[in-house]
Amino acid sequence: MGKRRAARDERRTREFAAFVAGAGGRLLHVAALLTAEPPQRCVTAERLLTAALAGTYARWDQLRGEDPYERTRQELTARFAHSAWRHRRPGPLGHGPLAALTPQERLVLVLRLHEGVAEEVTAATLGLPPDRVRAVCARAIAVLRDPDRDPDRDRPRDQRAGAVPGSRAAEGRGP
């Protein structure tokens, strides 16, 4: 039994290493876009990707024909969404090209435009109605097209910069 298990573990490690060698750069780019960090200094993105890859590696034997890239991207987006929700910070997170967007806008934009995920699949992944995904994507594109535009203009009150859930700004009663 020991030799078979060792051989299986070795095969698993080789397969996973080949996957990371082939897809790691693209996944890191996705993570950097999500965290709004510049590609040269993407510490948070690297940490996020490492956690997502660890989750994929832990379930490597359970993939059974499932695309490991898809699985890792799902893990990456779920971890990003969870951390963005848990650690809400007012203002932009980083200084990358998507820093002016909210985490939800970055997530939708990266999935829809950079990764080419269908609107319905993005909606199902994020637990949103397709109309909401369409609206968030359109709003994010509008913010990117016109950097001088007030980014809070079209956002719901609870998603405006500096608005903390339950605060007066989030409820529209002033600062």
Image (tube, grey):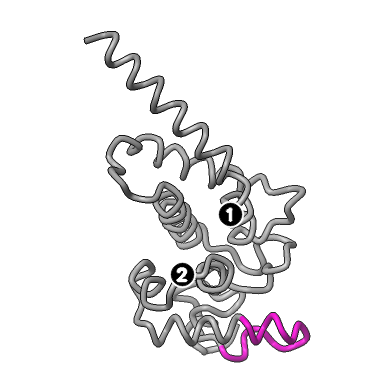
> What numbered label is drawn on residue 51?
none
Tag 1 residue: 31
Q: Quadrant of residue 70?
A: bottom left
Could you tell me which residue is drawn at 46 percent across and 45 percent down? 52
Question: Which SS class for mark 1?
Answer: helix
Q: Amino acid at mark 2?
A: Val
Q: Amino acid at mark 1?
A: Ala
Asked if residue 151 lies left or right of residue 157, the reply is right
Could you tell me which residue is drawn at 42 percent across and 51 percent down? 75
Q: Is residue 143 magenta?
A: yes
> What numbered label is drawn on residue 117?
2
Asked if residue 22 lies left or right of residue 5, the reply is right
Q: Are marks 2 and 1 in contact (CB under 8 Å)?
A: no
Q: How packed is label 2: few (under 14 Cα within 10 Å), some, or many (20 or more)? A: some
Instruction: Give the alpha-carbon distance from disc 2 to disc 1, as whole Å.
Output: 16 Å
Q: Position of residue 69 (x, y in %)?
A: 46, 50
Q: Position of residue 9 (x, y in %)?
A: 36, 21
Across the whole image, how many numbered discs are drawn on residues?
Answer: 2
Q: How packed is label 1: few (under 14 Cα within 10 Å), some, or many (20 or more)? A: many
Name the residue nearer the viewer: 164 or 11: 11
The extreme left residue here reads 1
Where is 57 relative to 40, above or below?
A: above
Q: Position of residue 5 (x, y in %)?
A: 28, 16
The chief SS type of the magenta part is loop
Q: Which marked residue is nearer to the observer: mark 2 or mark 1?
A: 2
Quarter of the rendering occupied by the C terminus:
bottom right
Q: Quadrant of residue 30?
A: bottom right
